Image: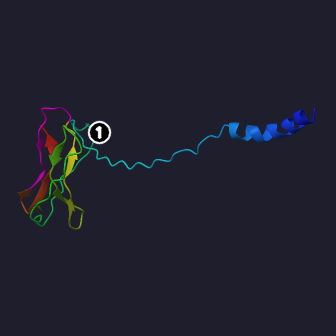
Amino acid sequence: MRIRIWMLALVPFAMIGCADETPPPVTTTTTTTTQEVTTGVPSSAVVTREVVVPQAPPSVRIEAQTVAPGPGYIWTPGYWRWSGRDYVWVSGSWVRPPRTTAVWVPGHWVSRGAGWIWVPGHWR
């Protein structure tokens, strides 16, 4: 009888290893960078106006083209954007075309009258 009481006293200690412990949750941090490119015909609700810039844009920069993020991406070269006060360089980037046969026609500046206007790039 003494042995049985002694064994009953040890049962809680024996059960300690049987507890169901849930491991702490794993935290994963992901950074996603996206670029939105308009690939369709602009809506009739969109109002645009031609801005004539009084000074010529700087020479186009020669950029080091990075490795494509995956198959099917097309490199769109950088360009000078008018900020309203001066030109700001917009770096080139990789984008997925709207269809496999699409070709990117880069935007460019055109001399018109007393200034320069921007002709935006588009898919053809």
Residue 8 is situated, as x and y percent measured from the top left of the image, at 86, 35
Residue 45 is situated, as x and y percent measured from the top left of the image, at 29, 39
118 to 22, vertically: above or below: below
Q: Residue at x 87, y 39 (%)?
A: 6
Locate residue 76 relative to residue 47 in the image: left or right.
left
Q: Nearer the viewer, residue 40 or 55?
A: 40
Q: What secondary structure is the stretch in magenta mostly built from? A: loop
Locate residue 47 relative to residue 61 in the image: left or right.
right
Circle 1 SS class: loop
Quadrant where the image shows the N terminus: top right
Q: Nearer the viewer, residue 72 or 19?
A: 19
Q: To which quarter of the image does residue 82 belong? A: bottom left
Locate residue 10 relative to residue 119 in the image: left or right.
right
Q: Residue at x 24, y 62 (%)?
A: 83
Q: Nearer the viewer, residue 86 or 74?
A: 74
Q: Nearer the viewer, residue 24 or 57?
A: 24
121 to 60, vertically: above or below: above
31 to 8, vertically: above or below: below
Q: Is residue 78 magenta?
A: no
Q: Residue at x 31, y 46 (%)?
A: 34
Quadrant where the image shows the C terminus: top left
What stretch of residues is rendered in magenta?
A: 98-109
Tell which residue pokes out farthest to the right in this image.
1
Task: Please rate how many residues cluster around mark 1, counting C-alpha atoms within 10 Å: few if below 14, some from 14 to 19, many from 20.
Answer: few
Q: What's under tag 1, amino acid-wise?
A: Ala
- Label 1 sits on residue: 45
Q: Is residue 99 magenta?
A: yes
Residue 35 is situated, as x and y percent measured from the top left of the image, at 29, 47
Locate residue 42 relative to residue 65 in the image: left or right.
right
